Image (cartoon, helix red, strand yellow):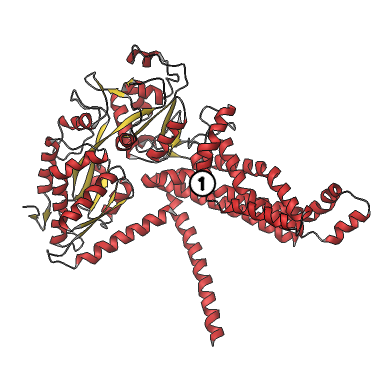
Amino acid sequence: MRDIIFKRLLSICCILILLISAGMIYSLVSGSLSAFGHYGFFQFIGSTEWNPHPDRETYGALSFIVGTLLTSFLALIFCIPFSLPVALFTGEFFRGKKIASFISSIIDLLAGIPSIVYGLWGFYTFRPLIIEMGVNAQGFGILTSSIILAIMIIPYASSLSGEFISMVPNELKEAAYSLGATRYEVIRSVTFPAAGSGVFASYILALGRALGETMAVTMLIGNTNNLPTSLADTGNTMASIIANQFGEADGLKLSSLIAIGLLLFLITAIINLVAKLVIKKLN
Amino acid sequence: MKNLFIILLAIAIASCGNSKKNKGSEDKKMNIAAAGATFPLPFYNLAFKTYQEKTGNTVTYGGIGSGGGIRSLKDKIVDFGGSDAYLSDAEIQEMPYATIHIPTCMGAVVLAYNLPEVKDLKLSGEVIADIYLGKITKWNDAKIKELNPGIILPDKELTPVYRSDGSGTTFVFSDYLTKVSNDWKDNMGTGKSLKWPVGLAAKGNPGVTGTISQTPGSIGYIGSEYAFSLNIPMAQMKNSSGNFITPNTESISAAAKGDIPADTRTMITNSSAPDAYPISCFTWIILYKEQAYSNRTLAQAQATAQLLDWMLSPEAQALTTKVHYSPLPKSAVDNAKALLNSISFEGKQVLK
C-alpha cells in the first residue's frame, strides 16, 4: 500500500515538472509568435537593427546572439589555461591527496559566489584595470565581460573534467609508465585520449553556464545594441537585453524580447544536448 | 525570475484588494492597492506612511514601472496606477473605462558629469543633442566653449552615458531634446528607450551614476531625486528664455507655472517660464473616473479619492522636498483638485 502511494507521489511530482517545462515552452512560443510573424523567423535572427522609435519600430536579434556567443566562447577559451591545470592537478598529479581536495573545494567555492558579486568586483576592481591597460576608454566591453565570465565558469569546467581525468584506469597509465613513458607523455598519450570526450563535455556544460549568465555580463558589457566588431567593443547579450528592457516593454517589443528568450533557450538546449551525447558516447 | 516576482506581487496586490472589498463599513481601516512608476517611489513611500499614521488607511504601492502600473490598472487589480508618462489618446481608448490623471509631484532630469577640473558647467539642449548624437566628441569643442566663457575645458574625450533599461527618465530627456533639436527629432525621437548611436549604457539611475563616477570625461542624464540626494556635479541648463538655470526644487516647480491643459496631460519640458529648469516633469497617478467597477465599494472609492485629495494638500506637498522632489505649484494643484472632484461612484461625486 505504502509502496503504491510512494510510487504515485513520485510520478505526480515528475509529471508536474514536465508540465511546468511544457508550460514554459508554450508561453515562450506563444509570446514570441507575434514578433516572428511580424518580421519572419530568419529576418528576426539575421537583423542587427534594434530601434524602439515608435514610427519605425524594428527589432532583430543578431547583435545579441553574436554578443552572447562571442562572450561565451571567449570565456571558454580564456578559462582553459586555468581550469585544465586545476583538473590535472586534482585528477592526476595529486589524486586522492589532501591538497587536491583542498584545492578543489576552494575552486568549488568560486562556483558558489553569486554572479552579482562577480559583477561588482568586475565593475569596481577589474574595469579600472582594463582602462589602465588602454583596451578602451571606458573599460566596458566584450573583453571585460568574457574575462569575468571565464573566472565564473572555471569551477564548472575544472571539477567535472578533473573527475573524468581521475577516472582513467590506473592499469593504462601503469602500462605506459612501464614502457618508460614520462609523466608528460602519459598525460598526452594516455590520460587525454581516454578522458578526452569527458573533458570536452565538461567544457560544453561550462559553456552552457556562460551562455545564460545575466547579471555580471549586464554590468560589464556596456549594453549597447550594436554588432561588436572587436574585443574592445561594447555590446549586449541576449540575457542582458531581456533583463534591461522587459520592465517597460509592451506589444511588439515585449514579443521580441520573449522571442530572444526562446532563442537563448534553444541555443542552451542544443549545447546541453551535444554535451550529453558526447558523454553518452564515452560511456 | 524578476518577471515571476512581479506576477507574484500583482497576485498579492490583487488578493489584498479582494479581501477588503466585502468589508463595506466606513469605520473599517481601508487598504488601497496601487502600483506603477519607480521614479516617485521614495516620495510615495514617505507620503503613504505619513497618511497611514494619520488616518490608519494603508496604501500598498508596488514600484513595478510605469508600464506595469498602467497594465495593472487596465487589469483592474489596483485602485490606481502611477506613471511618469501620461496616456496618449490611443492608450486612453484602450483602457476599459474613462481615466483621469492626477499629478502628484515634480521632478527633473539633470545632466551629471565627471570632469573634476570644471565647476559650474553650462549646457544647452542643442549641445546635449549633439553630444548624444555623436557630433561633439571632445570637451573642448567650440560649441561647449561658447556656452562656458572663461572656463578652460580639457582636451578630453566625451563619453555620453544613457539608460540601458526602458525608463521614464529617458522619456522626459528625449522629449525635451525633441522639442529643442530638429536633428534629434528626425533621428532619435521620444521614447522610454531609444536607438543610441554612441555612448555607454547602464541600468537604472544608480548604474548611470556609477558609470559616470567611474569614467573620467563622461556625462549622463539621471533623475533629479537621485542626483540631489547624492549631491553630485550637475550642469546648468539654458532654458527657453536663454537663462542658465541650476536644477533645484524651486526651478523645477517653476516649470509648471506655464499654461497647463485642464486634464494635466502635458509634458512641461522646455517650459516658457523664465526661471524654469527646462527638463522638468510631472509624475501622475492614473485612476478611473467612475469608481463603481468590478464590485468596488463606495468606501473603497472614497478612501482612494480622499488619499489623492490629501496628496495635493500643503502637508503632503511639503514632504516632496524632504525626499528631493519638487512640490506642485498652486495652479497645478487647482487643476488636479478639479479633476479629483470629477471622480464619481454610480454617477455621484465621491469627494464632498
Describe residue B201's horizontal placement relative to residue A208 as left or right.
left
Point out the image quarter for the N terminus of chain B: bottom left
Q: Position of residue B152 (x, y in %)?
A: 40, 13
Residue at image x 9%, y 54%?
Answer: B350
Residue at image x 33%, y 61%?
Answer: B11
Residue A171 position by quadrant: bottom right
Callout 1: few (<14), some (14-19), or many (20+) C-alpha neighbours within 10 Å? few
Residue at image x 14%, y 37%?
Answer: B332
Which residue lies under the disc numbered 1? A117
Residue farthest bottom in this picture: A1
Q: Is residue B311 visible?
A: yes
Q: Along the line of sight, which residue is nearer the eye, B242 or B263?
A: B242
Q: Along the line of sight, which residue is nearer the eye, B245 or B269?
A: B245
Disc 1 residue type (three-letter): Val
Describe residue A101's horizontal placement relative to residue B114 as left or right.
right
Residue B101 position by quadrant: top left
Q: Position of residue B96 (x, y in %)?
A: 23, 53
Q: Is residue A233 visible?
A: no
Describe residue A15's horizontal placement relative to residue B121 as left or right.
right
Residue farthest left in this picture: B352
Question: In the rendered view, would you say A246 is above or below B33?
Answer: above
Q: Along the line of sight, which residue is nearer the eye, B186 or A273?
A: A273
Q: Position of residue B352 (x, y in %)?
A: 5, 52
Task: Pinpoint the chain carrying mark 1.
Answer: A
